[in-house]
Image (tube, grey):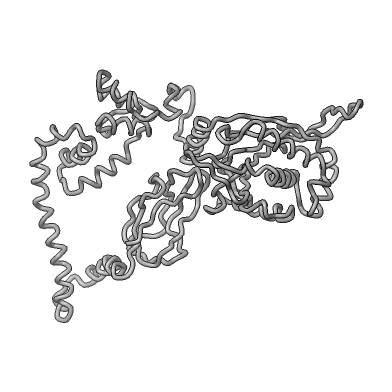
Amino acid sequence: MYEVTMPKLSDSMEVGKILAWKVAEGDAVHEGDVLAEIESDKAAMELECFQDGVMGKIVKPNDAEVQVGEVIGYIATGDEAKAAAKPAVPAPKQEAGQAPPPKAEAPAPAPAAPPAKKAEKPAPKAPAPPKPEAKPPAPVAPRPPAPRDAAAAPPAPAAAPPPAPPAAEARERAVRISPYARKLAAKLGVDYTRIEGTGVGGRIMARDVEEVAGAGAAGAAGAAGAPKPSADEELPPVEVTEDEAEIEEASFRLKTQARRVVASKHVIPHFYMTASADVTALLARKDALKEKYGATVTHLVMLACLKAIAAHPEVNRTYDRGRVIKWKGVNLGLAIQTDQGLTVAVLRGADRLSLEGLVKGAGEVVGRARAGRLSADDRRHPTFTISNLGMYGVEHFEPIINPPSAVTLAVAAALPAPVVRGEAIYIAQVMRVSASCDHRIIEGVMAAKFLQDLTALLEDPGRLLAGQ
């Protein structure tokens, strides 16, 4: 069987949500077919098939949130595909021919064998009920190990134990519990499916698990070795009533985005540096550049960044778990606002493009982002990220770093400001650019030199546009 796993659709993606399966079990599938629609932390995307065969089993249902790399289904190939397709064929034949005797003359032995095997399987299932009956005394002993408890608990209360495992999975999915509370429950050996949550909408919180486990020695021991709580749980919950506000569950994408920006801010030691550029001369050529190349201020800033990175390749690196990653090209991340929220699209190999190529490439990737059609490559490995809010008149801002970029550059509006030249004061168009830097791999002087060259390029259109 070929495993269909939850794909990693972006560098920041850890969990994906299955919005809808586009195929059913028993359907023939071919390379290039769309198997399902998946929602990542940034957008909804189609999951393509990479193997011809028959959809053997769908493991994870619609609306399931699944870890990247986890199996969500199986595709049967070769002889397995024929076997997988059989269940879909016998069903209609049995309905049409309810009297098998007439047709049993020729193929009697063959069809008879499969039904016999299928009949033999229920036989062992009959003795299955007694097994759970014999287990009632056992639940008391296996309580310490949480996993066994969870597996043994559902059969006991159920009148018909055969469907117990699926019921247990369904009930576990239905339980609303915070990630930290789930880890804590596993640590303390608590069956959280039996806990009544005190959070919003009955969600189980860490305090609920600790209360069940006991606030004494067990709670203290658990707290000592328990995993670090999420940022949401480090803050007390906001207690509100229906009269005060409307409360709704955050979307999957919003929750993922919240988790990622908190992780970036918590893990990466940010420092910020701002420089100003007199872009009066550059803006004077804006209309001509727009007419010739279709270029906007954003494209000119992109070109300036790429030239500055060429002079300072050390800013195009990533620190990752004791490793220094020196990227061989510049994958330019562009922060884009879409109808679904903020996303970062990646223009790959941007350092090899001319101004005209940047305009064309950026236009294509931005178009796919706003249509919700970014591919995995359109999201993968932004080595330097740009966020431009200048069109909104923003004077200055400091963005959160977008990993694996070590630098995320904020571009503000070009606004009139007094500038001293020699002994005279002029009113010039001044643009502020701010670099949010990862201090694990970017040093102050390194960032200062980069910004110095960047602003020099923005102030000198001749140098910036040389070779275009």
Q: In this view, does 109 lie to the left or right of 466?
A: left
Q: Is residue 129 left or right of residue 72?
A: left
Q: Where is residue 38 in the image (x, y as percent from the top left)?
A: 45, 50
Q: Quadrant of the N terminus?
A: bottom left
Q: In which quarter of the image is the C terminus?
A: bottom right
Q: Where is residue 453 in the image (x, y as percent from the top left)?
A: 74, 39
Left or right of 159? Residue 284 is right
Residue 73 in the image: above or below residue 428: below
Relative to residue 351, is residue 249 depicted above or below? above
Which residue sits at x=31%, y=58%? 57
Quadrant in the rendering for residue 159: top left
> Residue 121's spot in the image, x, y percent?
14, 59
Residue positioned most to the right: 424
Question: 135 or 267: nearer the eye?
Answer: 267
The location of residue 214, given as percent across then percent down, is 25, 21
196 is higher (above) or lower (below) than 458? above
How many numbered marks are there? 0
The foreground one among 300 and 258 is: 300
Question: In which image quadrant can residue 426 be found?
Answer: top right
Q: Which residue is drawn at 18% across and 78% down?
A: 107
Instruction: In the displayed orientation, state which residue is furthest to the bottom.
Output: 106
Q: Which residue is rendered at x = 21% and y = 35% of the image?
A: 145
